[in-house]
Amino acid sequence: MTDLIVCTALGMEARAVARGLRPRSGLGGGHPRVRVVRIGMGPDRAARAAALLPPAAALAVTGFGGALHDGLRPGDVLVATEVRSGGRVWPCPSAPLLAGELARAGLPARIGPLVTSPGVVTGRGRHALAREGAYAVDMESAPLAAAAGTRPFAAVRVIVDTPDAPLLSLATMGGAVAARRTLARIGPVLARWAAAAGPRRVLLASPRSFCAGVERAIEIVERALDRFGAPVYVRKQIVHNIHVVRGLERRGAVFVDDLAEVPEGAVTVFSAHGVAPAVREEAGRRGLRVVDATCPLVAKVHAEARRFAARGDLVVLIGHAGHEEVEGVLGEVPGAGVLVEDEAGVEGLRPGRKVAYLTQTTLAADEAGRVAAAIRRRFPDAEGPRGDDICYATTNRQHAVRAVSAEADLVLVVGSANSSNALRLTEVAARSGHDGAPLARLVDGPGDIALDWLRGARTVGLTAGASTPGSMVDAVVAALGGLGPLEVEERRLTEENVEFTLPKEVRP
């Protein structure tokens, strides 16, 4: 059986794709068997050709297409999230994976619905299809999507014409030359997509995604918007996740790095990571209406820092430089606090007074434990926090990812690159595998997953940082399901039932 059949309507499209595949550049060893087939223009020819195609593990259609969406320009590449025709819809769930790979290959890739038309669409016809939400139009994808059945299927179109640049204009004809070059670059990416296809198992680590502190912080911003109206200003990111931030921005939240960017008297939310007293004082001087979304577990570390400093101790904070939580805690004890990032940092301490130590709440428990042990060895009378500073959610998610890593060929941690807890989950996963560590990668969503990671990875562990929406995990599962049969197992280690009260400013 052929690993991949790539269908094109025109001979020039087929030759361009085949030319890109010929050197086998960028495919790696053991590249998939790819066959390029010219099927002719129009849905009728495509349907007849689809009935005669030989067996293949995966099926793709590519070539030129017409833009419907205002954001698409000649030379852009549309990867269909679904193919529509005659009231029927064929989903293409692996589209984000393929679009991400095309983008990493340097191509301007977008995802969106593709509609198949029985003929060339112009003028009002294009505007009507655009109003229905379609991004681009072609004449061949629907019959091939129907013929694919349960096999992985992809439809990828290089835009050559738009409503403002009709198909037969001189500008469009010139753009076809560049589009052929783009088709040659699409071929190797389709081959990698086919190589990543196949049945696999996904092990969902649980608990994962939002913790109580993150849910509380997001709800605070949402309630502030409902109660006070937009804009509501938020100092720093409310939680470290770009999808959360963009969603709140769409509702009217304005995120700022400095209070100087906030108009006097405006409603201002402090993020879940906490702030130093100097920030609170500045907000007071400027008459800002503050709603504090600091996580109660972070507030506990602030209180402990003040307690230790008040009795004259040197407060050693185990954490990472530059993190907002670290800046807030050390801001509580100016002149009495010092940051230590690792065991080597402990050796450089020259306190001259009793030592007390605290921990950033989002660290990897094993690494923080080693640093704390080094502090106690060097300073036997050092006092630590009354309870573990690393929050319950961080600890639970680290235990859960260890459990799935033991069985996985690849572990995907869904979270943003500035999320400390997501980064620590990735590091824990990389240290926890069988037969040496599994490949562990941090991704913001399915578009960040390199197809080469999936090649040969038949068991994938999946988790998400405490600031990551569960919907992003669902999106990764859906995308993986577009590559072949998927068996999903949830591995639940513990139940979480922690709830935090809201500040009085936004309570019902």
Image (spheres, grey):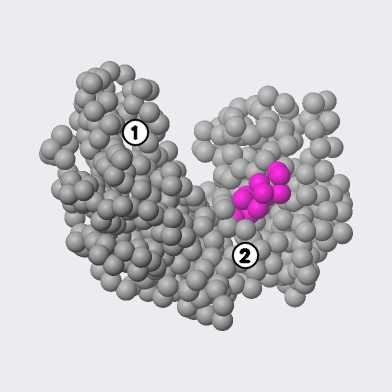
Q: Secondary structure at mark 2?
A: helix
For the residues labelled 2 and 1, the Cα–Cα distance comes to 37 Å
Q: Which residues are magenta?
A: 94-107
- Front position in the image: 180 or 164: 180
Q: Quadrant of the N terminus?
A: bottom right
> Among all residues in the image, which is located at the extreme bottom?
435
Residue 113 visible here: yes
Looking at the picture, which amino acid does disc 2 mark? Answer: Trp
Q: Position of residue 5 (x, y in %)?
A: 75, 63
Q: Which residue is mark 2?
A: 453
User: Which residue is painted at 61% across and 27% down in the image?
Assistant: 124
Quadrant for residue 144, please give it. Answer: bottom right
Q: Position of residue 323 (x, y in %)?
A: 40, 45
Q: Position of residue 127 (x, y in %)?
A: 58, 29
Looking at the picture, which amino acid does disc 1 mark? Answer: Arg
- Locate residue 403 relative to residue 175 in the image: left or right: left
Q: Quadrant of the C terminus?
A: top left
Q: Position of residue 435 (x, y in %)?
A: 56, 81
Mark closer to the chain start, 2 or 1: 1
Above/below status of 260 relative to 273: above
User: Which residue is painted at 27% across and 42% down in the image?
Assistant: 333
Mark 1 Cα shell of 10 Å, populated few (<14), some (14-19), many (≥20): many
User: Which residue is painted at 80% across and 33% down in the image?
Assistant: 175
Q: Which mark is residue 235?
A: 1
Residue 86 visible here: no
- Front position in the image: 289 or 65: 289
- Front position in the image: 3 or 304: 304
- Front position in the image: 459 or 172: 459
User: Which residue is painted at 32% across and 43% down in the image?
Assistant: 330
Which of the two marks, 2 or 1, is nearer to us in this view?
1
Q: How many marks?
A: 2
Q: Magenta region, mostly helix, strand or loop?
A: helix
